[in-house]
Amino acid sequence: MIKIPVLIALLFTMLLNTQAQPGRWIGSLHRSDGNNIVFHFEWKKEKGKDAWYIRNAKESIRVDNMIRKGDSMIVHMPVFESHFRIKVQPGKCEGVWIKGGAYKTQVMPFTAVPGKKRFNTSTAATKNITGRWAVYFAGNKKEENSVGEFVQKGNIVHGTFLNASGDYRYQEGVVAGDSLFLSCFDGSHAYLFKALIADSATITNGTFYAGATYTENWTAQKNSQATVPGESVKMYLRPGEESLHFTFNDLNGKPVSILDERYKNKVVIVQLMGSWCPNCMDETAFLSSYYNNNKHRAVEVIALAYEYSADWQRSVNSLTKIRQRFDVQYPILITGVPVTDSLRTEKTLPELTPIRFFPSSVIIDKKGKVRKIDTDFVGPAAPEQHAAYTQHFEHYINELLKEE
């Protein structure tokens, strides 16, 4: 006979196991100003284990590193240095999202409930924002400092913003009446955009919310010819320089040099990146696939990582996640110089003018000379620009490979 306390404990355990029902959930990161950042995820059971699939438009992020004890769960994001600590309750979850940083750790309250609508509105759209837009953040209308690209079907909107520092990745949302709502969460980015669509060519009263506290105003004008000015992130070789000379340790502590025999008489792409950087994640996915398909063609890739801190183990842990996530088979080297160091370029790649943008790439020809410094990467959240970048990149490498 099962004793009453034991029976109660068994029933309680069974209840806990049914609280997190598989299906679609809406998560909310709570800001103190009430502008909560919402996102959609699907909760599944796979071989008896929990898994989340965080959805942002066409992106699906599989999250399966979860530790569960009773009604408590720790959910580790697969790439970035962030995780959730939550309590699973009937029909809801409550807890916090914790994200590591260069200077401090960010903590935001988090809740989630079953649901299918990212933004809980049934109001039909009275405006359509499909197209390309010149976007002005913080009221700067002296130049087109960003570009917005959106596709709207009914009241559902997908798109992104692009500027000289990269893109804002996959944004998803709705147009309710004449109001626009977009959001994104990928483990690093936690973004919310709101705005009023004044007419077919004007977006006004926009506010951009990022993380726990950041807020910025924005407006936009429809412009099919809008471009992103890139000069502010350009890098160059310093006068008198033509090659790079560096040696850093890989994730196993083994020194790797650009002068090693492995890289002689080959075209080499030197990727400047960090595990904290969502656009670097997109570029790593691109370069990893490219390298795995082309490494037989005298092409090599080396990643130089500039992390949040000089802590070796912290850097190894973060970079190992990105290596495993994207099956990176080329060396990832830890520079040991934090991304926040104002002298990061002088300490690592003194042949270059200051590194202003991550990700960037330095392309080296078969003779070991720098032929191009590439700061133009565009991620797949802007599919047309990403396709154009991919085509240009592959053509350029092919031309270098033809050289003797």
Image (cartoon, grey):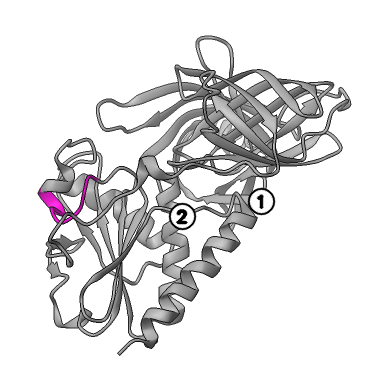
- Which three-letter amino acid code belongs to the residue tagged 1? Lys
Q: State the CA–CA distance, disc 2 to disc 1.
A: 19 Å
Residue 21: give x, y in percent of width and height: 68, 39
Residue 376: give x, y in percent of width and height: 44, 54
Would you place residue 318 above or below residue 206 in this image?
below
For disc 2, the neighbor class at 10 Å (few under 14, some 14 to 19, many from 20) is many
Q: Is residue 78 visible?
A: no
Name the residue rendered at 84%, 21% in the picture: 177
Point out the tag, 2 or 1, that comes first from the N-terminus.
1
Please name whichever residue, 207 or 137, is drawn nearer the observer in this view of the structure. 137
Name the residue rendered at 66%, 51% in the picture: 58
Residue 388: give x, y in percent of width and height: 58, 62
Q: Which mark is residue 58?
A: 1
- Residue that carries the numbered disc 2 in the rendered image: 377
Does residue 404 appear left or right of residue 199 in this picture? left
- Which three-letter amino acid code belongs to the residue tagged 2? Phe
Name the residue rendered at 25%, 39% in the picture: 308
Q: Quadrant of the N terminus?
A: top right
Please name whichever residue, 377 or 98, is drawn nearer the observer in this view of the structure. 377
